[in-house]
Image (spheres, rainbow, N blue to C red):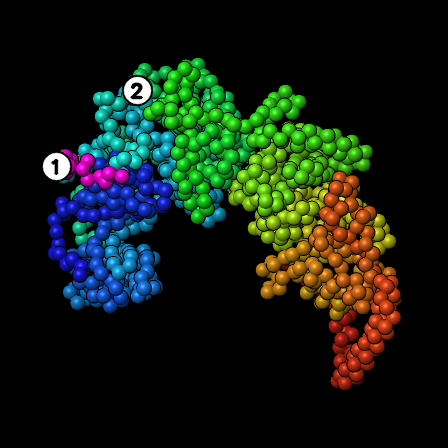
C-alpha cells in the first residue's frame, strides 16, 4: 500500500530525480554534484538525488543538462487496474496538490495486466480526483495541455511509482522566440549544446574567469558553483560531513574529468576563457556558451513552474535562490573572455546573430569569417597578468552539407596549427568537442579520447572529444601514456597547383590523374562545339562512381559551378569507404576544374542544411538526394537522372529571385543549385532540345507535356511556332518555365502555362478539337505526388496509355518526341501499334558526346500516328493479328453508331456546340489564376 503520511516539514528530505536523454547521465551527475546536491546516483536516463525542496529548485534553475526534475511521491504494488486505483487513491493528495490546481497524468511502462499506458493514466487520474472530491468536496480540473500539476506514473512489472513534475515544461525549452518561430532555421537543442560544452569544461572555465572591474582585471568575487554548493550545505548543516558517503561507488569511480565540482578560490588559477565555434550552424552551441559566460541561470526567465502547484513549495527559498541567480549574473557581467563563432554558410551566421540578439547575448560573441587568420585576429587580446587561456573548440557538423565537410575539416586544422598573434597570450592547443554523424572526423582529427552516443532530432550522432595537442618535449596529459595525440591522418596529394590537397585515401591520386585528363579533353570539345555546360566525368573509375557536371554562367551572371552526383555504391562496398571516396572527389574536383569550393554542389544524400533551411535564396552548398522522384540518394542507379516529381517545398518567388543564368543553343536559362533535386536543365537532353527546334520549324502549334522548367518550350518558340502550351503539375516549375520564356523574350497571349495532371488533361483535350503539330513529352520515371490524388505514375506501366492519348492530340501530319530516363524502359510496341501508334527509336542520335560513356542515360523516340493496320504492319505483326484487330475496330464502330442513333434529337447539335466552345481560343486551357 502507498504511504499516506500527513503534511511534513518544508525542510524534510525528499527523493528527486532529473531525467535526461541517454548518454547524458555522467555529465548530468557531475553537474548536480557541482550544484551541491547530495546522494547523487546515476541510472539509465535519469540521475537521482536527495534533499529538501530547495535542492530541487536549484536543479530546476541551474541545470543545463536535465530534461525535467521530478519528486517521487510513492511506490506501491499495481498488479492490475483495481490495485493501481486503490493504492493511488490511498495517497494523501490533499497534502500534495495545491487546492484549485489543474491536473494531468502521463504514464509509461506496461505489465501483463496493464497493457495500455493511456488507460493506466486514466485510472490514476480517476483515483486522484475521487480522493480530492471525497476529502475536499471538489474535483480538480483536468488540463492536459498546460496543467498546474503534472503527475508521472511509471509501471515496471507489478510495481508502480508516482512522481510530480516540478519543472512544468521541459527544461530544455529555453530558446528565444526567434529560434522557435514557424519557419525558423533549426537550432540545436540547448541540452545537447550544453553536453558538448561540458566536454571542453566550459562551465568550470567560465566560473574561474577574471572579472574586469574597470581599471584592471581581478579574480571573480566567488565561484558560482562553489557558492551554490555552500548554500545547499548550509541548509543541511549535518549533511556536508556525510555527503561524500552518499554517492554510489560506481558514480564516484566514473566521475568525468569535466565535473563542475566546487573550487577552492585560493588554490584555483585565474583563467581567460576562450571558445571557438567553427560551425555555429543555427547558433545553438554559441548561444549556450554565451549564456554560461554571462552567468545566466538557464531557468532564470521562466515564469511558470511545476512546483507552484505543490503544497510543499517553499516560496521564501525559491525567492532567495532566484534573487541570488540574478546577483550572480550581475557579478558575471564583467567576465573577460572570448567567444568567436563562424560558419562556412553566411546564412547560418545570420541565423546565429538573430538568435543571440533575441536572447540579449549578442555582446558576448564575436563573429568572424571562416578563415584561420581572421579567427586568430579576433582572438587577439592584451596579456593579463596571471591569466591562462583555457577553453576549447566546438563544432556541430550534423547539419553540414557534404561538400562543405572537407573545407570545415581544413579550417579546424588551420586554426589548431595557427600561431598565436603577438600579444594575444593565447595558445590554441585546445581540446575539441564535435557533435557529428560523420566517421571521417576521427580520421582528420585523430582518435577521440571520449565519445558519447546521442540522438539529436531522433537521429544517431556522437559527441567526440579530442584532447589538446601536447607541446613538443612534454609528456601527454593524464596518467601514463593513455592520451592519444590528435593528428591529421589524411594524405596530401600534389595536384600541380602549388598547394597540397589532403585526402582520406591514397588511391584518390588515380582519380585526380583521370579527372585532369578527361577535363582537358572535355574542355577542348566544349570550346569546339560552343557548349558551356557539360559533363566532365562520368564514373570513369568504378571505385569513384560519380558524375561531375560543370556549369559556366552567362555574361550576366559569370561564374563556374560543379554539380557532383554520386551513384549508389553496391551493397558489398563499405559505406564509410564510399563516403571517404566521395569526400575526396569533393576535395579534388574543384581544385582541378578551377571552381570555388562554395560553388560545388553534391547530390548524394539528404541533409537539411547547405542552402536549404538557412535561407533558400542564398548561395552555398546543397546536398540533396539523387535517384527517384522522392530523392532517395542511395537508391540512385548508375546512369539515371533524378525524377521530375512535384517540386519539394520551393520558394514562391522563383520568377523574381536571383538565380545563375547559363546559355545553351543561343538561349538563356535560369538554374538553381540549392533547392532542388535537379538544376533546372537536363544536360543529357541538349541534342534532344535541338531536335525540338528543328521539328518546330515546320509546326504552328507546340505542346510540352511534363514540361518541367519549359526549356523545350523555349526551343520551340525560338523556331517560330505560333502558339505554345506548357503543361505541368507543379506551380513552381510552371513559374520557372514562364521565367525562362520571358528571359528569352517569348511573351504574349500565344504562350500558355497550364497546371494540371497530364493524364487527366489529355483525356479532357481529346474531347475537344484542339490538336498540335509537335508534342514534346519527357515524363518522370515515377511519381506519387499528392496532387495526383490516389493515383501514382510509373512510366513503364503507364506509357501505353500516355502515348495513345497524346497521339490523339496530334494533327494529321503531326509528330511527337517522347523521352524517358528509365534505363530498363521497354515500349510495348505491339499494344501501341494496335492503337495506330508507331515509335521510332532515335536514342543513339540524341546522346551527347559528354554522355557517350552512358548510352542508357535516356531513351528517345519519334511518335507518329497511323491506321491500326498500317501500324501493325510496320512493327511486323502477323496477318492474323491484323485481321482480328480490323474486325474488332469494325465491331466497335457499329456499336458506337448504334449508340449515337439512340440519342435524343438535338444531342449531336449540343455536342458540336460544346466542341466549338472548347476549341482553340476558348477557355480550354484551364489557365492558372
Residue nearer the viewer, 173 or 416 = 416
Left/right of residue 241 with respect to residue 208 in the rendered view: left
Numbered tag placed on residue 237 in the rendering: 1
Q: Position of residue 645 (x, y in %)?
A: 63, 54
At mark 2, the secondary structure is strand
Give the alpha-carbon distance from disc 1 to disc 2, as whole Å: 35 Å
CA neighbours of label 1 inside 10 A, class few (<14), some (14 to 19), many (20+)? few
At mark 1, the secondary structure is loop
Left/right of residue 433 with respect to residue 797 in the rendered view: left
- At x 79% / y 62%, what residue is drawn? 829
What segment is highlighted magenta in the picture?
Answer: 237-250
Compared with residue 574, is residue 910 higher up or lower down, i.e. above or below? Answer: below
Residue 739 visible? The answer is no
**For residue 583: magenta?**
no
The residue singled out by tag 2 in the image is 217
Left/right of residue 163 with respect to residue 353 in the rendered view: left
Identify the image quadrant of the N terminus. Answer: bottom left
CA neighbours of label 2 inside 10 A, class few (<14), some (14 to 19), many (20+)? some
Amino acid at each position: 500500500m502507498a504511504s499516506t503520511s500527513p503534511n511534513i516539514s518544508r525542510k524534510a528530505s525528499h527523493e528527486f530525480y532529473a531525467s535526461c536523454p541517454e548518454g547524458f547521465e555522467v555529465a548530468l551527475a557531475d553537474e548536480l554534484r557541482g550544484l551541491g546536491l547530495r546522494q547523487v546516483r546515476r541510472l539509465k536516463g535519469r540521475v537521482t538525488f536527495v534533499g529538501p525542496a530547495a535542492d530541487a529548485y536549484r536543479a530546476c534553475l541551474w541545470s543545463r543538462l536535465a530534461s525535467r526534475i521530478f519528486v517521487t511521491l510513492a511506490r506501491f504494488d499495481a498488479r492490475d487496474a483495481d490495485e493501481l486505483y486503490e493504492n493511488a487513491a490511498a495517497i494523501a493528495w490533499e497534502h500534495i496538490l495545491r487546492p484549485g490546481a489543474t491536473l494531468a497524468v502521463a504514464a509509461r511502462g506496461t505489465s501483463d495486466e496493464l497493457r495500455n499506458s493511456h488507460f493506466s493514466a486514466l485510472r490514476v487520474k480517476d483515483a486522484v480526483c475521487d480522493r480530492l472530491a471525497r476529502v475536499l468536496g471538489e474535483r480538480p480540473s483536468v488540463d492536459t495541455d498546460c496543467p498546474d500539476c503534472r503527475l508521472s506514473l511509471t509501471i515496471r512489472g507489478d510495481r508502480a511509482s508516482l512522481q510530480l513534475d516540478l519543472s512544468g515544461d521541459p527544461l530544455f525549452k529555453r530558446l528565444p522566440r526567434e529560434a522557435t518561430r514557424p519557419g525558423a532555421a533549426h537550432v540545436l537543442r540547448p541540452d545537447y549544446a550544453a553536453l558538448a560544452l561540458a566536454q571542453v569544461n566550459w562551465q568550470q572555465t567560465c566560473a574561474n574567469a577574471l572579472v574586469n572591474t574597470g581599471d584592471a582585471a581581478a579574480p571573480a568575487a566567488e565561484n558560482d558553483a562553489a557558492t551554490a554548493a555552500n548554500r545547499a550545505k548550509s541548509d543541511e548543516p549535518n549533511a556536508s560531513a556525510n555527503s561524500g558517503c552518499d554517492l554510489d561507488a560506481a558514480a564516484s569511480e566514473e566521475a568525468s574529468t569535466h565535473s563542475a565540482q566546487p573550487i577552492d578560490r585560493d588554490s584555483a588559477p585565474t583563467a581567460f576563457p576562450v571558445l571557438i565555434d567553427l560551425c555555429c550552424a543555427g547558433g545553438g552551441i554559441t548561444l549556450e556558451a554565451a549564456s554560461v559566460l554571462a552567468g545566466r541561470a538557464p531557468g532564470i526567465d521562466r515564469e511558470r513552474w511545476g512546483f507552484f502547484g505543490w503544497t510543499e513549495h517553499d516560496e521564501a527559498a525559491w525567492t532567495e535562490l532566484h534573487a541570488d541567480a540574478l546577483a550572480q549574473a550581475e557579478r558575471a557581467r564583467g567576465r573577460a573572455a572570448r567567444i568567436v563563432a563562424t560558419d562556412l554558410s553566411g546564412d547560418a551566421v545570420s541565423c546565429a546573430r538573430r538568435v543571440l540578439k533575441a536572447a540579449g547575448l549578442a555582446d558576448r560573441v564575436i563573429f568572424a569569417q571562416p578563415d584561420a587568420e581572421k579567427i586568430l585576429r579576433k582572438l587577439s587580446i592584451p596579456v593579463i597578468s596571471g591569466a591562462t587561456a583555457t577553453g576549447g573548440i566546438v563544432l556541430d557538423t550534423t547539419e553540414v552539407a557534404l561538400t562543405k565537410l572537407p573545407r570545415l575539416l581544413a579550417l579546424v586544422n588551420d586554426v589548431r596549427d595557427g600561431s598565436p598573434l603577438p600579444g594575444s597570450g593565447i595558445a590554441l592547443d585546445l581540446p575539441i568537442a564535435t557533435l557529428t554523424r560523420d566517421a571521417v572526423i576521427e580520421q582528420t582529427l585523430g582518435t577521440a579520447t571520449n565519445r558519447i552516443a546521442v540522438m539529436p532530432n531522433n537521429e544517431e550522432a556522437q559527441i567526440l572529444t579530442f584532447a589538446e595537442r601536447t607541446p613538443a618535449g612534454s609528456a601527454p596529459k593524464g596518467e601514463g601514456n593513455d592520451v592519444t595525440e590528435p593528428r591529421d591522418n589524411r594524405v596530401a596529394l600534389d595536384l600541380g597547383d602549388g598547394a597540397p590537397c589532403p585526402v582520406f585515401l591514397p588511391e584518390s591520386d588515380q582519380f585526380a590523374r583521370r579527372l585532369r585528363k578527361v577535363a582537358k579533353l572535355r574542355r577542348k570539345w566544349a570550346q569546339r562545339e560552343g557548349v558551356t555546360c557539360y559533363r566532365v566525368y562520368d564514373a570513369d573509375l568504378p571505385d569513384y562512381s560519380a558524375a561531375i557536371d560543370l556549369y559556366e554562367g552567362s555574361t550576366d551572371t559569370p561564374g563556374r559551378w560543379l554539380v557532383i552526383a554520386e551513384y549508389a555504391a553496391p551493397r558489398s562496398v563499405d559505406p564509410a569507404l564510399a563516403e571517404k571516396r566521395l569526400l575526396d572527389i569533393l576535395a579534388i574536383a574543384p581544385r582541378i576544374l578551377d571552381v570555388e569550393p562554395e560553388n560545388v554542389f553534391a547530390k548524394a544524400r539528404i541533409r537539411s542544411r547547405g542552402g536549404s533551411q538557412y535561407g533558400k535564396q542564398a548561395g552555398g552548398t546543397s546536398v540533396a538526394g539523387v535517384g527517384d522522384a522522392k530523392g532517395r540518394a542511395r537508391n540512385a542507379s548508375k546512369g539515371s537522372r533524378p525524377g521530375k516529381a512535384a517540386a519539394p517545398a520551393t520558394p514562391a518567388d522563383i520568377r523574381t529571385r536571383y538565380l545563375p543564368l547559363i546559355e545553351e543553343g543561343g538561349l538563356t536559362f535560369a538554374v538553381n543549385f540549392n533547392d532542388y533535386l535537379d538544376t533546372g536543365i537536363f544536360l543529357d537532353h541538349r541534342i534532344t532540345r535541338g531536335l525540338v527546334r528543328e521539328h518546330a520549324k515546320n509546326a504552328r502549334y507546340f505542346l510540352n507535356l511534363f514540361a518541367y522548367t519549359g526549356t523545350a518550350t523555349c526551343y520551340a518558340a525560338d523556331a517560330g511556332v505560333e502558339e505554345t502550351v506548357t503543361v505541368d503539375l507543379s506551380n513552381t516549375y510552371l513559374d520557372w518555365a514562364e521565367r525562362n520564356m520571358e528571359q528569352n523574350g517569348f511573351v504574349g497571349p500565344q504562350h500558355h502555362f497550364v497546371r494540371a495532371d497530364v493524364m487527366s488533361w489529355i483525356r479532357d483535350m481529346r474531347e475537344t478539337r484542339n490538336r498540335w503539330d509537335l508534342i514534346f513529352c519527357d515524363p518522370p520515371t515515377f511519381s506519387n505526388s499528392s496532387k495526383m490524388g490516389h493515383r501514382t505514375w510509373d512510366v513503364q506501366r503507364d506509357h501505353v496509355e500516355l502515348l495513345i492519348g497524346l497521339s490523339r492530340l496530334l494533327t494529321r501530319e503531326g509528330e511527337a518526341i517522347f523521352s524517358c530516363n528509365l534505363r530498363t524502359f521497354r515500349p510495348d510496341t505491339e499494344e501501341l501499334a494496335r492503337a495506330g501508334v508507331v515509335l521510332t527509336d532515335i536514342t543513339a542520335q540524341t546522346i551527347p558526346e559528354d554522355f557517350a560513356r552512358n548510352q542508357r542515360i535516356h531513351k528517345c523516340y519519334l511518335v507518329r500516328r497511323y491506321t491500326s493496320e498500317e501500324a501493325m504492319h510496320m512493327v511486323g505483326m502477323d496477318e492474323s493479328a491484323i485481321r482480328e484487330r480490323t474486325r474488332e475496330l469494325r465491331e466497335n464502330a457499329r456499336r458506337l453508331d448504334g449508340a449515337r442513333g439512340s440519342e435524343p434529337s438535338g444531342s449531336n447539335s449540343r455536342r458540336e456546340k460544346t466542341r466549338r466552345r472548347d476549341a482553340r481560343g476558348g477557355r480550354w486551357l484551364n489557365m492558372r489564376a
